[in-house]
Amino acid sequence: MHNVSGKAWVRKEDYALEIPRIARCKDSGWRRPADDRAQKHFVPETQPVAFQIARGVTIYRQFGPRAQENEGSFYRPGVPEVPQGIRVLRFFNTNPEHYSVIFTSGCTGALKLVAESFSFSKEHPPLEKTAKSNRQSTAPDDAKTDDNSQQASKGGNPDGETTRGDNQTAPDKSGEQDGGKRSKGSNFVLLEPERSPRSRSGYFCYLQDNHTSVQGMRELAAQRCSAVLCLTEEELKNGHTADTIVTGTVDQTSPTGNCLLAYPGQSNFSGRKYPLTWIEASQNGGLGFQKKLAGRWFVVLDAASLVSTSPLDLSRFQPDFVTLSFYKIFGFPTGLGALLVRNTSSWVLERRYFGGGTVAASTARDSFCALRPNLSERFEDGTLPYLDIIALRHGFDTIQNLAGGMDKASSHSFLIAQYFAENLGRLHHGNGTVLAEIYASRDFRDRESQGAIVNFSLRRSNGDYIGFAEVDKLAQLHEIHLRTGCFCNIGACQLFLGISSDTIRDNLNAGHVCGDDKDLINGRPTGSVRISFGYMSSLSDAVRCLQFIAECFLETHKTATKPTFTAPEWYVPPAVDAVTNKETSAVFGRSEFHGHGTKAAEEKRADDLGEKRAVRDEEGREGGSKGSEREEGETRTTDVTCSEKHRKLTDIFLYPIKSCGAFRVNEWEIGDRGLLYDRTWMVVSENGIALGQKREPRLCLLRPVIHLDSRTMELTFPGATSYYVPLDAGDVDDMSDVSVCTNKICNDRVNTGDCGDGVAAWLCDTLERPGLRLLRQLDRDKRETKRKDLGSQSEAPKGSGGLSLANESQFLLISRESVRSLQKKLAEAHEDSQAEEKDEASKPVVIDEESLVQRFRANLVIDGGLPFDEDNWTGVTCGDVQLTGQGKCSRCGMVCLDQNTGEKTSEPLRTLAAWKGGKVYFGVYLRANNSSARQTLTIGSPVAVS
């Protein structure tokens, strides 16, 4: 565990960005608090607006009245990216004399290009002075770095060429350079056939703390190099061992070959900034692990995480290859990255494939191809995303104009991360146990060695880990967006979480894959929680996230004082609010944290549904008022006498359309997939994805009513005319398989049929969304539950668990005793909050019993017994119907939607999580013991359990 404490070196003026321009961004709605800025940045509205204006100009230039005249100056391949390439190089303090820009699809694409092109066996190094054909178009004077500073930074070599580790000089072989044989009398590079097989040479080494994309490079490298090595930081400094060799063998007697070291400028897992001095040391063979690995050494620096919040000066540090993603710097455009190639190292990249736009000449009937002499043009296959490349200029302008430059952005984001990490490390449970286990190889005192990333796991007062999926689930309720898992960096995940390679294989066999929500296996975490900050973050974001963690996960005595988070000494709040032009409170936290617009957002959501809710209230329509056997005037079933020893079935709900409103009945037949017609239909978007209440809350107002007499399903919605759909499956059009749902639990495939254009048009008009379709699960579909029977180590017997479009099981059961117990906790939390000064939207709310029952969307509701004693039932008998228990139901934010209005609150999930701890469970899954027999469930039936 790394406990961050103490006072850091900072100055007030370093907190450069807590100024009115950030306040304007904060209220503009383009970012959320405590987001994961290491993955992406949100985009201020000025950036895409400027891009749209620029794009409009270029489109006019291309297709306007003088299009033919302008086509030669704009649309010719290779032209539009040149000025943007110069701007890219200027951003990293270099110029085309020293580096070339190859645009790629992202950082991954750039790493793959290096892995495919790097020659481990090329016998001759480059000429001492690389031909100018390596370079891009001549840069303007202001794009060039000072020659004297360049020379000094490279130890006095005016050409910028570092002496390689083998101390070999470069022979002068005219006509051969730049990654291929040159045609006589020209600068064109001839594509050479692959050399005949020979003994492998050179090594590929990578730091264990690296992105998955770097691990992928080893698979290509292993086919061409002598050995692949994976190194920890300690091994890199002091020397490799036998355990570091992933594949191949190390021949200490061979001095030939080209070797490649890959490491990140900043770990995307922990934020550790690795020394850039390793670059020159590695190129000179001076690192500890290189003592027994002879050869010419090159360095590829994965700068994607580093340059998102930190400057990179390529006039001072000169890796041979730099990979990056512009999305991580600007947030826009996506799918665009770059490979920066040091011109004096370009000779080691060899092409084996050529695409459109990269050749000067080629023949179809024999093996001849002359590649373009310009390095960038030679490696950029096909049509470049030139409109996205144009957008880069506006990203660079945003960094400069809004953030004040990358150096200030770096200082600003680091100070916020430092504040968050220090306060998180001070949080302790009531028994003294530390709440957070922070994963960092350095403390947060120096931004030269630590970035604006805080990675951690949370632990309970008894020392048990809290799964990252549960943290994420509750964070969403607080509108805090963070990232969880291993962040495509399994190497760092293994180092910090102590996960062995054998454990990874065992976890895979247990069903855990990258990106799922299996956060704990045998009590050990499979991933962690990452919070990172960027130039648009504010100190109030850190405070809000700290308050969320303390409120939801800190276990203290009831009388204990809740932790407070005071402003650091260097914090100077704005004197005047940039939006309201009013003075900002001098007390830190209150105005910033609670004045984040949450109440206004809730009021807006309420207004959005106001008109339709008013219509609904006027009509007094309730789901099941038509077609069910239960009328409004009938006696409530909850009046049935129950006790701790006597339980009865009080309610039966079915949900004919997945994620839509409930249909309440007095009795109902059981089919081979659960309740007859339960979750038989679903609404899908124009992309074919099942629509749920998380994306469309108004689905709860769409209430289907089953009419068995007329064999129709009536679709009702406030303010809309009802629509009738036939119950018989023969009235739908057969179609191909579609995905049942998009979450990671139930990504099954089912046979469905389309219910036609008429109901589709009604859905589009009612929900005001284009492209919606109503699909029905076909009778021939064989989907089955994958849940295990409680107490059994195997899945339900084959054929006993036919499944509709429900997520996991045939039935979901809840107990009213458990609901009342939760309701009591909600009331207590609400009462406690009255004494605190809280925004109304952040206070716990009191929810009546019936509304709570509806939020949990159960099929069966019982009364009697003790609260939560249903959690461990292995069997339930309702009347004559026998059901088998299949475990507890893990809850998500869907229970926070009021099923009568579609409005979202933070309750009851927040109180339930704080009260129960661990995973948020409520209700249990069941399956019918004999789904093939004709059986009927009836309210009022006695319930027996086992």
Image: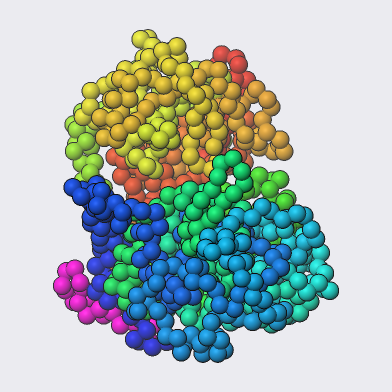
**Image-based side of 767 in relation to 799, left or right:** left
Residue 53, placed above or below residue 646: below
The answer to whether one can see residue 789 in this image is yes
**Image-based side of 129 in relation to 251, left or right:** left
Magenta residues, start to end:
562-587
Q: Position of residue 361 (x, y in %)?
A: 51, 51
Q: How is the image coloured?
A: rainbow
Q: Position of residue 395 (x, y in %)?
A: 34, 65
Residue 459 magenta-drawn? Answer: no
Between 450 and 709, the one lying in front of the other is 450
Residue 358, placed above or below residue 454: above
For the C terminus, the image quarter is: top right
The answer to whether one can see residue 484 in this image is no
Picture mark count: 0
Between 589 and 489, the one lying in front of the other is 489
User: Extreme top residue here?
Assistant: 709
Residue at the location (69% across, 74% down)? Answer: 296
For the N terminus, the image quarter is: bottom right
Residue at the location (72% across, 51% down)? Answer: 505
Q: Position of residue 547 (x, y in %)?
A: 41, 67
Q: Position of residue 300 (x, y in %)?
A: 59, 69
Residue at the location (81% across, 64% down)? Answer: 249
Q: Image quarter for residue 787? A: top right
Q: Image quarter for residue 18? A: bottom left
Residue at the location (67% across, 76% down)? Answer: 171
Q: Image quarter for residue 477? A: bottom left
Residue 585 magenta-drawn? Answer: yes
The rendered magenta stretch, by its main secondary structure, is classed as loop
Between 28 and 142, the one lying in front of the other is 142
User: Extreme left residue here?
Assistant: 581
Residue 226, placed above or below residue 610: below
